[in-house]
Amino acid sequence: MEQIKKDIFISYKNDGSGNQFANRLWQDLEAIGYSVYFNSKEERAHSFPERLRTAVTNCRDFLLILSAGCLDQLQRHETIDWVREEVLCAKEQDKHIIPILLEGVDLPKDASDMPEDLRFLPHIDAIRFPEQYVQSPLDVLQGVLKAKKVGSDRYKDTFNSNPYYRIEEDYSNLLTSAKSGDVAAMYELGMMCFYGATDENGSLSKWDYENAAYWLGKVAESESDYKAHAMNILGRMYYQGTMPRVEQSYEKSYQLHVAAAALGNEHSALEQGYLQRVAVGCKFDYDAIVDYYQTKIKNGDDISYLALAKFYSQHGRFEEALELYDSMSSVSPEAEYQLGILYRDGVTTNPPQPDYFRASYHFRNAADENHLQAALEYGLLCFRPSGNLKKNFAAAEKYLTIAADGGLDQAQYLLGYLYRTGLIPRDLEKAVDYLEKAKEQGNSLSALELAMLYQQPECQNYGKAFECAKMATSHGVAEAKLILGNLYFWGRGCDADMNKAYEMYSAAASHGLYYALIMMKKIDQILDANR
């Protein structure tokens, strides 16, 4: 049987207005990322086909397009009526049925005006769409759909879908040319295998590192234009440990990258600098690293300014780092951010003395260029200022929002905390939103805040409070153990369990939370009284 698996099934009468509307709705839903079954070529005559029954069975949402002709047909209960069969199949499978009313169409107020097996339809909430609808009704529909947008998984099963390219034929031709000594074919074949386009049989199934190493090794022995890049890939394979039948070797990786860099390969030059900086595959040589970056700077590589400044900073040469970052600050938000770090940590003076004023200046400049870490740092300084800085919760909200909307979980947590506590205008909806985003990234303090927030009347959801308390407890947050003990004791979000409550209180008491000791005594008294 054909397996049709689409999240949304569109049912319609092929009567002009119904078909045209269904076709447009299908295109619009697909365009914004939903998986939709719609077949405009169905004849909709004769017996109900099994493929449609399968599609209805596998969907999550069943959209019933009710044009005037479709509703009339359902009420007349025609013998051959695919829409009716689709609706009854959806009802039988307990699907999420969403009637969509076109202009001028209303379901009967009296369910007895429908055939007996369709009398459930008038009791279902319907959505009204004008035939020439705009975006807002589509937003309404999305709000009730159970299906989720396919998103990045939309093409997860798409496989060798280019109708103009036959990889088996290409692979076979390249193999013949490579065996005859064609270096270009050897290179292309090796790269095809390295990037997983084919295995030794020419099928799209896995990376074939063995053939990649063999053919790129041949290219590396040549004097062709492909030599340097082949050496770069071989160096990566030694570094990753994917070279067949040999152990992972940082030393060989370094040697290959040095040789490839000498031939002008930019990627290997970067790898050489990295391996030298972290002393992997080679001995640490401070002067050689500085010479390497200074040579690249002289050749016009601006990125090396930042790399050398970072290297200076890591090795205590703060004046040199400061000078380089300062020279780049007008064109590089990263340089501004790093200047802020140096001033914040006070490493520009001896003994170290933090300069929060200068740090805030550079953090703000970088943040205004949408540097997320700088926005977080400036927001932190506004939230809990040091030195001569003053609190500025409005600025904290502004810059933490930049970092939070950019995905930084610490900023999401702090912003949620500000909204929850009312240090800025209190907004529990925003608090929950940001704290949930941080929790999804594993931020345990956000889970703790939510465990308390979900017990407040405005956001009450004891089930979520319980799950958040469990998460924070699993991360070792002491207060979360006390909260989880309370939830077990009161039976909120879970079945009351004195033993588990006692266990959590005991764990909390070990952190000095003395209220837990009181609750442990209470449990002892309750259990003693009921023995």
Image: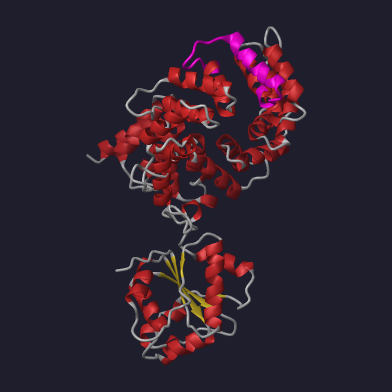
Farthest top residue? 350
Front residue (pair 431, 369): 369
Which residue is nearer to you in this view: 456 or 32? 32
Q: Which residues are magenta?
A: 277-304
State whether residue 30 is above or below residue 380: below
Q: Residue 145 in the image: x percent, y percent?
A: 49, 64
Residue 304 lies left or right of residue 505; in this view the side is right
| Image quarter of the N terminus | bottom left
In the picture as drawn, the residue positioned furthest to the left comes out as 531
> Does the magenta run of residues contain 287?
yes
In depth, the one of 83 and 96 nearer the eye is 83
Quadrant where the C terminus sits is top left
The answer to whether any part of residue 63 appears in the image is: yes
| Quarter location, residue 319 | top right
Q: Position of residue 326 (x, y in %)?
A: 75, 21
* Vertical relation: 522 (above or below) 40: above
| Left or right: 312 as drawn, with respect to 118 | right
Q: Position of residue 5 (x, y in %)?
A: 38, 64
